Image: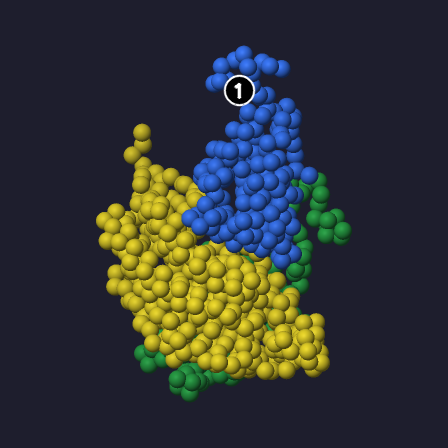
Amino acid sequence: MGLEEKIPDSIILTSLDKMVNWARKRSMWPLGFGLACCAIEMISTFAAHFDLARYGMEVMRASPRQADLMIVAGRVSMKMVPVIKTLYEQMPNPKWVISMGACASCGGVFNNYAILQGVDRIIPVDIYVPGCPPRPEQLMDGILKLQEIVEKDSLKKVHEEWGRKAV
Amino acid sequence: MRTELSEFLKSKFADSLTEQELFRDQQSFVVKPDSIVSVCEALLNDENLEVKFLADITCVDWLGHEQEKQGRFEVVYNLYSYKHSYRFFLKVRLDGESPCVRTLTGLWKGANWLEREVFDLFGIKFEGHPNLTKIVTPDELEGHPLRKDFPLTWEQPVFSWNKDDPPEVRNER
Amino acid sequence: MSAEKKTVTLNMGPQHPSTHGVLRVKLELDGERVVTAEPIIGYLHTGIEKTMESMLYYKAIPATDRMDYLAPMSNNLGYCLAVEKLMDIEVPEKVKWARVCLVELTRVASHLVWLGTHSIDLGAMSMLMYAFRERELIIDLYEACGGQRMMTSYIRIGGLASDLPADFEKKVRNIIKTIREKMKDYDKLLTENPIFIMRTKGVAVISAEDAINYCLSGPMLRGCGVNYDVRKANPYSGYENFDFDVPLGKNGDAYDRYLIRMEEMRQSLKIAEQAIDGMPEGPYRAHVPGVVLPPKEDVLYKMESMIFHFKIITDGFEAPVGSVYQAIESPKGELGFYITGDGTNIPRRVRVRPPSFVNLGALPILTEGHLLADVVCAIGSIDIVLGEVDR
C-alpha cells in the first residue's frame, strides 16, 4: 500500500488478532498440577536439562485462577474427576488443555473400575501427547503444536467458544 | 526361632491354633478369629520372641476355589521380630456372609490404616476400630473392588458429568 | 466476641504444589498451631492390585513400574523376586549383581527427586534444578538398558529383559564419579545452611516407640535410631556380598531423616561401585524351560526356544497353591509383595505392602502441635509417592 513508508519506524501495522495471539502464544502460564508418573517427566521438562523456559512457558502457577494452560499429567481416578472439573472451571478464559500421556488420553494400561478412560470425557482437550510417560521432547512438541493452534486463533472465534462444553 | 515360635503358640494357644503351614520357608499359622488379638498381644509382649513389627494386614478372597470351603476370606497378618530377623504369618479364616474380626488398633496404631484399607477393598469389618470408613475408593462407589465378584472394568459411580450417559449403557457398548 | 476457643478447618490439596501429588490434608487449626491433621488419600487410586490379579504373571510387570514411579526398578525387583520365590527359581550370579547395581542407582535417583522437592518446599528453589540435572544421568542409563526413560520394566522374572548394554560399566562409573562430586555441592547448599537447619531441626519429631507402634519403615524408622534395614536383616538378591553401612539417626526429626537419606545416597554409590567391580560373566536369564522366557537371540534361531516363548507369552505358567512374601528395601522403606498362587496361570492375590502408605499414617502425630508451615516439611520428610500410597 505504501502506507508503511509514510509512518515512522517505531510503528508496525498488524491486525489485532495477530498481535494478541503473538502475545498469548509466548506467555503461556501452565497450572502447576501433577497427577502421577507423567508429572515427574513434566518437572524434568521444566528443570535444568530440558529447560522449557526457552519457549516462554516456565511460569508454573499454583493457583488455577492465574493459569491458562492445564497439563493433565497422569491417570485420572474417579475420585479426582470432580476436582479436575472444578480446577478447569476456575481457570479464566481463554484456556487450553494438554492431555499428557496415555492414561490421561485414553486410560492407558489401566482399563478398570478406578480410572477415567480419557480426560476428554470431562473437559475439552486441545492436544494429546502420547507415551507412557512421554519424553520431555514429546511434551515440548505438544506445547509447540499448541502454540500453532493459539497462533491461528481468532478473537471472535475464541469469544464464541467460551461457552463450549465437553464432548 | 521357627521351633520356638511353634512351641510357644502350641503351648499357650493350643485351642485356637488350628493349622500350621510351611511354604517356601515361610511359616504361617491359622488361628481362630476370636483369639487373634490375644495371640498378637502375647507375641508382642513375650520377652524372648519380641514380635514388635506388624508389617502388613491383607486379605485373600478364595471365591470359586476349593479353599472356599474353609472360609471365603483369609485375613493375613504379617508379623516380624527385629530381634530374630524373623518373619511369619498369622491367618484368620472368615466366612463370606458377614466377615468380622477384632481390631488390632489397640496394640499397633499403624493397624488403623491397614485395617481401613482391608475394609474398603474387601468389606471385612474390624470390631472396635476407631474410624472404620472408606480410605481409597470414592464415596460414591458401591461394593468392595478387590472381591472376586466385583468386575474389573465396570464404571459404577455416577458423577455429575455422566448423568446423561449412564454407566449401564456405556458398559454394554 | 465469645471467649470460647474455636478452631479453623483448612483444606490443603489435592491440588497443592507441596503435597507431592494429589494428597489432601484436612487441618484443624488453632491460630497457627495444628490441632489435628488428617490425610485424605485415594485421589490416585488406580486399582493396580486388581489389575495385576487379572493378568498373567509376566504381564503384571509394567503395572509395578507405575506404582512407585520414582523408583520403578525397585518395584520390578520386588515383584520378580516374589514370583521367583513362588516358582522356586534360582537366577544366575550376573543377574543378581546387575540388579543390585541398578536398584542402588534407582535409590539415588529417587532420593534426588526427594531432595529437590523437599528443599523447594522449604524455599531452596535452586536445589531442584541441580537434583534433576544429576538425575538425568541415571535416567540415561535406564534408557540405554531398557529403552525407556522411566518405566523400563527391565527386571523380568528369572533375569533381565536383555543383556546389559556395551557401555554399561563406563556409564555407571561416570554416574558414580559425577554424583560423588556434586554431593559436596549439596552439602554446602543445605547441610550447613542455617535456614534449612531452622526449618528442619526439631520439626516432625517421632520417638522410636511411636515409630514401631505406627509400623514405620525405611528412613522414617532409622531416623529414630531403630536399626532395621531389609538389606542387612534379611538379605535378598545377594546383598550379603556387599559391604555397606546403614546410617542411623538419633532425634527422629526431619533433619536427621535428611542426613540419613544423604548418607544412603553415598552408600548406594559405594554398593553400585562394588557391583560394577565384581560383575561376573554369565547368562542374563535363568534357564528354566516353561517358566522363564528364553533369551531373545535363541528365539530367533532355535525351534524349541521359540515354542517356549510362544507358550509362555500366550498361556503363562501355572503357579502352585500357596503364598509367598518378599520384602525389599525400597527408597521409601520396606516394600513387600505378597503373592498368592491358586494353581492357575493368574495370581489369586497380589498385595503390595506400600511403605509410603504406612508411613503417611503417622502424619497426624508428626504435625500435632506444630506450626502450619511445618506440615509441608513433615510431608516432605516422609517422602511419599502418591502412586504407591493409593495404588
Chain A's colour? blue
- Residue A149's image quarter? top right
Of all residues shown, which one is farthest toward the right? B173
Q: Which chain is green?
A: B
* Chain identifier of the residue bearing label 1 in the image: A
Quick check: C379 above or below A12?
A: below
Image location of residue A59, percent across then percent down: 45, 38
- Residue at 30%, 45% in the rendered image: C371
Image location of residue B168, percent across then percent down: 72, 50
The one of B139 and A105 positioned closer to us in this rendering:
A105
- SS for callout 1: loop
Left or right, A78 with respect to C111, comes to: right
Residue A6 visible somewhere in the drawing: yes
Quick check: C247 above or below C286?
A: above
Image location of residue C125, percent across then percent down: 35, 45
Chain C's colour? yellow
Residue for badge 1: A12
Which amino acid type is shown beneath numbered disc 1?
Ile
| Image quadrant occupied by the N terminus of chain B | bottom left
The one of C389 and B55 positioned closer to us in this rendering:
C389
